[in-house]
Amino acid sequence: MPDVRTHAEEISAQFSDHLDVTPEEVAEKLRTLVEEYSVPMDEARRSVTSSYLEEAGMDREEIAPAGGESTLVGEIDDDEQWVDLEVQVADLWEPRHESIAQVGLLGDESGTIKFVAFSTSELPELEEGVSYALGNVVTDEYEGDYSVKLNRTTTITELDEAVEIGDDSTEAVGALVDLQSGSGLIKRCPEEDCTRVLQNGRCSEHGPVDGEFDLRVKAVLDDGQRVQEVIFDESATEALTGISLPEAKQMAQDALDTTVVEEEIAASVVGRYYRVSGPELGRYVLADEFTELSGGVDAEETLIRARSI
Amino acid sequence: MSSNNGPTREVARRVFAAEYNDGSHTFKESDDERAPLYYLLPTGERTNRVFLVGTLTETEDVGEDSEYWRGRIVDPTGTFFAYAGQYQPDAAAMLRDLDAPAYVAVVGKPRTYETDDGTVNVSVRPESITEVSAGTRDRWVVETAARTLDRIEAYDAEGNEYGRMARERYNLDVDRYREATISALESLEEGDELDGGDADDGGATDDRRRESEPPT
């Protein structure tokens, strides 16, 4: 935790172009708030900064952020923070409103984050695939998802060296030791924006409904040290088992029973090894990509280890 | 480790038959009637579930009043015994229907049974039995070797509660399991028809050839 002196120096540096404030003066104000009025340092800093902003007739956006360390997009976990990023433009989307100049994804080694640049900020355009140092962007949060906003104080410097975009998906490797209930041919609620899985023809929200068929696998991967639950959606299930949704429906129709699909799937996947990767969804990894590990294995390395103990 | 909400699923341990059959001690870690029952491995790990892959060499209905199937599943170090009856209908059906020899993967719970002369037999109560390829079997052998070595290396480590428990209960020389591990891995190197093979699948021809080999 930086002391009063450090905070004071940072604040005075932020206003160095606009006001004549000495660190001593700032420190005095901070100390009064923190020591006499027991205000937390963050709040004291905010209050002192505000008073200087008013004095200089400036907006909060216009001052340079404290510190100079750039932040990784994966570290962003708070609203309204001023950060510097070094990122590559991973994707640009079509802005849906004229107030938005650019919208898309920025990435660095820790993953990707959405960004928005507003027309009023009059910033130079970012190009897809190009890496930039972005100074002074502000974080935003909406329903737990973070994004960054570029603003008119944002500095944009093209980088010579490309920033690598990391993979923020999770990988799980292990033996598929079990299928969970709700695997195979299932029915979902057809109500708009409701995709709940029906139990005995009932949706927990909408009551008895005519469900729509879907195919999925909920499985447990186990490497002997930990377990990871994974979900294969309809297309991944077809790739995994060779059973398509129409085929699954036919199988269930022929047997007059939907559980035959799950049994068939279990027989073809349980006991095999898989490597699965994809985004995490609560307890689950959603299988975007997977491979069965059934080819040659190298015993040599383990043998050397066994002999050296 | 898995710190998900809800009850945590027990991990399936990897252990060779030679070690698996040597233990005898089971215990619970709480007084709760439904607390999981653990079997103590001789290399010092608690086990509530196992995953094993081997050659099913023989199946027999040993039940008297109702079907009770026993399967012998052989790995490079010894034989696992799996028992499935009316409460494991899927596994029992697999043992009834499968033609030995076949490569099978078994997920199951350890069970111990004390005979009249006081020896303790350790078996597996299968949750599932599936037929798999030679490639899956080979991967299991290498993986089980690595997990066994993990346990051997941690056996004497300070704070290894189950290592201490194994020393107190069994007092076995764990080096024998290291030797079993070495010979298991060597058996792969020798008969390795998978070298340079198709990386996608063990291949049906490999299966047939392996299955026709006499079990060790």
Image: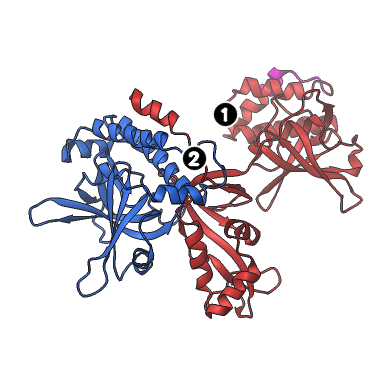
Q: Check residue B60 for magenta coloring.
A: no
Dot 2: element: loop
Picture quadrant of residue B97: bottom left
Look at 77% across and 29% down and name the residue there.
A52
Magenta extent: A19-27
- The amino acid marked with disc number 1 is Glu
Label 1 Cα crowd, 10 Å radius (few <14 / some 14-19 / many 20+): few
**Front-most of residues B204 and A87:** B204
Q: CA distance from mark 1 to mark 2?
A: 73 Å
- Say whether marks 1 and 2 touch (CB < 8 Å): no
Q: Disc 2: which chain?
A: B
Q: Colour of chain B?
A: blue
- The amino acid marked with disc number 2 is Leu
Measuring from the top left, give residue A237's x and y in whole percent. Answer: 60, 59
Measuring from the top left, give residue B140's x and y in whole percent. Answer: 41, 44
Q: Which residue is mark 1?
A: A35
Residue B142 at least partly seen: yes
Q: Which mark is residue B194?
A: 2
Measuring from the top left, give residue B56's x and y in whole percent. Answer: 34, 54
Dot 1: element: helix
Q: Going by the image, does B114 lie left or right of B91? A: left
Q: Disc 1: which chain?
A: A
Q: Is residue A77 above or below residue B65?
A: above
Query: Which quarter of the image is occupied by the C terminus of chain A?
Result: top left
Q: Colour of chain A?
A: red
Picture quadrant of residue A7: top right
Q: Check residue A26 for magenta coloring.
A: yes
Look at 89% across and 37% down and name the residue there.
A125
